[in-house]
Amino acid sequence: MDSALFRSTLETRLGVLQLTVNGDGTLVEILLPNQKPAAASPAAPSAARLGMRAACGQLREYFLGKRRVFDLPLEPAGSAFELRVWNALLGVPYGATTSYGAIATGLGLVNGARAVGRANGANPIPILIPCHRVIGSDGSLTGYGGGLPLKRALLELEGAIPPEQPRLFA
């Protein structure tokens, strides 16, 4: 595997995403619109270009409402525990939500919701590893690396929550 990383941007209706693939074309990171951009990358070999093209294409389809499941190789860097949490997130279907506590329970952890929340926040491949689908046990939208407005927009796009209604009176 080539250890070099290659980056590209993708403009979406929710802002600019920065995608990073390795030399094999495997997606390793997505930076959300409010996150600091990484350094520019060298010219990418053909495998990396193909991987980037596939990732951008599938994300475009997702934002158009035409894709519900991603079919891309992913290689998130994290601890063994974080990888377990992120794997559990992959089981949360499009249009659904779950809670930190439910994920912890599914992993066999007693009182593990906070640890799951920390792992959720460290997710390097948001959207594809759907950390935005994790909400508070009371149904409230809780922290998201991209900010709560982006989390709300992603959940609305997926139909997991109804669109926010504008307030007539403050």
Image: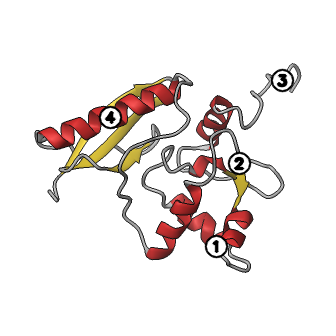
The residue tagged 1 is: 107
Q: Earlier in the sequence, mark 3 or mark 2?
A: 2
Mark 4 → mark 3, Cα distance in angstroms: 40 Å
Disc marking residue 54? 4
Are discs 2 and 1 less than 8 Å apart at CB?
no
Which tag is nearer the camera, tag 1 or tag 3? 1
Question: In the picture provided, is 2 more to the left or to the right than 71?
Answer: left
The furthest residue to the right: 169
Residue 113 seen: no
The amino acid at mark 3 is Arg
Mark 2: few/some/many CA within 10 Å (<14, 14-19, 20+): some
Q: Where residue 165 appears, x then y in whole percent?
A: 80, 24
Instruction: Tell me what residue is drawn at x 35 percent, y 39 percent.
Output: 18
Are the residues at dot 3 and dot 2 in contact (C-beta closer than 8 Å)? no
Secondary structure at badge 2 equals loop
Instruction: Return the disc, 1 or 3, that comes first in the chain's sequence.
Output: 1
* Mark 2 and mark 4: Cα distance apart in space: 26 Å
Place of residue 86 in the rendered image (x, y in percent of width and height, measured from the top left): 52, 61
Residue at image mark 2: 97
